[in-house]
Amino acid sequence: MYDQIERELKILVTKEIYEKILNSYAFNESRTQINTYYDTKDQLIKRNKGAMRIRKIGNQNIFTLKIRKDSITHFEYEKDINVDTISDIHDDEIEKWLSMIPLEEEVYPVITFKTIRNIYIMECGELCVDMTIYENHIDYEIEYEYTSDHDGIKTFNEILKPFGLTYHKNCPSKIARAMASKICE
């Protein structure tokens, strides 16, 4: 993310392709992320094309509010926090961000899932290879996140080409996939 703008390209892949890509790069970092997403009972955040979560990585908790700008761009507001739940946050900066989505009712945890993320740092972006474990299934995703302005689609397609893949449009977000899997229970 740069300047509170997140631009990412992502596609779902098979386990076999995931493993091939994982074995093709010397990934700089591997981490486990526990993601808990929040919304109101009437899905006000989702209806405003947003998402709110607390991501736990080891002992670190990160609050994130995303507001969609277009299919590959989000405004992303993030801050380390020292609490585990949204209701325990008392922070002026985060409250200012939340005022962009006028929350007139309480938010509550909607879903939690785990992602094992491998990160490869590149000149203008980060290649992330994710295995996400939901309650009822596991999926595999390749993501290219811009860290500076450039032709990210061209770069991502160059990464994907050796694996017989081409980027067309972003797959549904992890939260959307998690919720779809919950509905199918």
Image: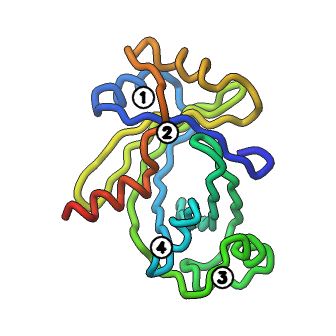
Mark 3 and mark 1 lie on one chain; the one further toward the N terminus is 1
Secondary structure beneath disc 3?
loop
Q: Check disc 1 and report the residue beneath it.
A: 22
How far is disc 3 from disc 2 in space, using C-alphas?
Answer: 29 Å
Under circle 4, the secondary element is loop
Front position in the image: 176 or 136 = 176
Which amino acid type is marked by label 4? Gln
> Callout 2: 10 Å neighbours few (<14), some, many (20+)?
many
Residue underneath mark 2: 118
Which residue is identified by label 4? 43
- Amino acid found under the numbered disc labelled 3: Ile
Residue at the disc numbered 3: 89
Callout in the foreground (4, 2):
4
> How would you rate the neighbour count of disc 1 (Cα within 10 Å): few for under 14, some for 14-19, many for 20 or more?
some
Looking at the rendered image, the disc whose residue lies closer to the viewer, 4 or 1, is 4
Q: Quick one: label 4 or label 3, which is nearer the N terminus?
A: 4
Q: Is residue 4 left or right of residue 48?
A: right
